[in-house]
Image (cartoon, grey):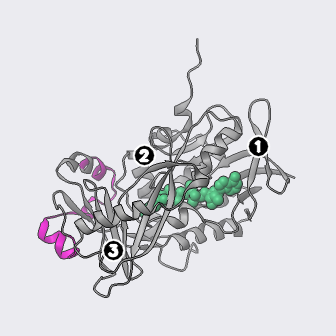
Amino acid sequence: MAHGILIIGGGIAGAATAWHLAQRGARDVTLIEREGDFGAHATSQNAAILRTFTEGDATAALAHETAALLSSPPEGFTQVPLLDQKGLILQLGLAGEQELVRWLDTKPDPDKVISLDAAALRERFPWYSGPTEGAYLVEDEGEIDVAALLEAYLRGAREAGVELRAGTGVTRFLRSATGVEGVVLASGEELRASKIIICAGGWAGQLAEAAGSELRLEARRRHLMVTSTDDTIDPSWPIFWSYPEAFYTRPESGGMLLCACDEEVVEPDACRVEPEVGEQIAEKASRLIEGVMDAGCAHLWAGMRTFTSDDDFLIGPDPDVDGLFWAAALGGHGVSCSAGVGRLAAAHLLDEEPSDKTARALDPRRFRVAQPS
Ligand SMILES: Cc1cc2nc3c(=O)[nH]c(=O)nc-3n(C[C@H](O)[C@H](O)[C@H](O)COP(=O)(O)OP(=O)(O)OC[C@H]3O[C@@H](n4cnc5c(N)ncnc54)[C@H](O)[C@@H]3O)c2cc1C
């Protein structure tokens, strides 16, 4: 059976791409997810933080676009609030001023960012006992309901005719002389498609090789811990992120979610919890937040963030393989940027050749290997 567009991966990237294609009236779109449930990997393992303060202007632009959708979703998109604007405190330290100015230039509403001195920081997050220099509260950012967002993308796509298939994975590509023209599923079924987009998170690197792409991606493991319930934690505390300490935290399920920003390159099929990292999280957290570990650890897990060599997203056509497209390497921003990622991926798939500054910065063709003259 022939398909127009095939999406590989049913995490937030694949779901947002499917939704945008559906919104644009694309027909003959199929999304293939290997697991029995959609969003079973990075999409359900992350910290659910909306943070538009990113490393580059292109990702900041996609994050602002997504923030707008989260705070004011389109008619019929969802029945539940997608964003709890509890605020995000960025502690940037003394060296962070230049980055802040660059980012404020991109932010549609810079008045929502206010400087906090030590007293104001501790008033908002009384448990915190670490460094306080260069702290800012971003009032309109906060916690995303990731499950509801994923569901909204998938439901919108399904209702507009996208075929969603879970429980079957792509095992190899059907190759033509210059590109790809289909895939083979684990069941042995062949699906032909004129365009195939890889939205496979931590497995995108494996699929690049299988499709004959020269692009290289790596999966980096990151752990999160949640402490046991403690009645003195106020669930309305803002999210706190310290850049000099490489640490973030927010209230979660009656305890505190803690991250020490570990990043170790892993084979995607071997991404498991490393108990030693749990100890490192506990040690760092205890140094910065007095008494935070008194309740003990309730839950420790690990997920994969995926990167290219320049740490920017890959959105658009493969440099070399005809018919192959990418919405991958979303690092630590895939949920925060999902609406922008899906919109840009759909524009490429619909042959609109977006070439604005954001599209150019994230276009996989920036990695094209120069041909010897
Ligand atoms: C610990 C941690 C904390 C994070 N915190 C945040 C945060 O606070 N805010 C934020 O915005 N981002 C955060 N991120 C990043 C964010 O989670 C990711 O960028 C995003 O989820 C990536 O989505 P994805 O759809 O690309 O990947 P995934 O969610 O991993 O989806 C890829 C899907 O592809 C499927 N797949 C793989 N191979 C195949 C195949 N061969 N055939 C079919 N299907 C296949 C997989 O089963 C999977 O479901 C965090 C990530 C981690 C790990």
User: Is 206 rendered above or below residue 168?
Assistant: above
Q: CA distance from mark 3 to mark 2?
A: 25 Å
Q: CA distance from mark 2 to mark 1?
A: 31 Å
Q: Between 316 and 10, which is closer to the camera in this rendering?
A: 10
**What residue type is disc 2 on?**
Ala
Mark toward the viewer: 1 or 3: 1
Mark toward the viewer: 3 or 2: 3
Q: Quadrant of residue 288?
A: bottom left
Circle 2: element type = helix
User: Is 311 rendered above or below residue 25?
Assistant: above
Circle 1: element type = strand
N-term mark: 2 or 1: 2
At x 61% / y 54%, what residue is drawn? 269
**What residue type is disc 3 on?**
Lys
Q: Can residue 338 be seen in the rendering of this structure?
A: no
At x 70% / y 40%, what residue is drawn? 210
Quickly name the residue at label 2: 58
Could you say which disc has been placed on residue 198 in the image?
none
Quickly name the residue at label 3: 86
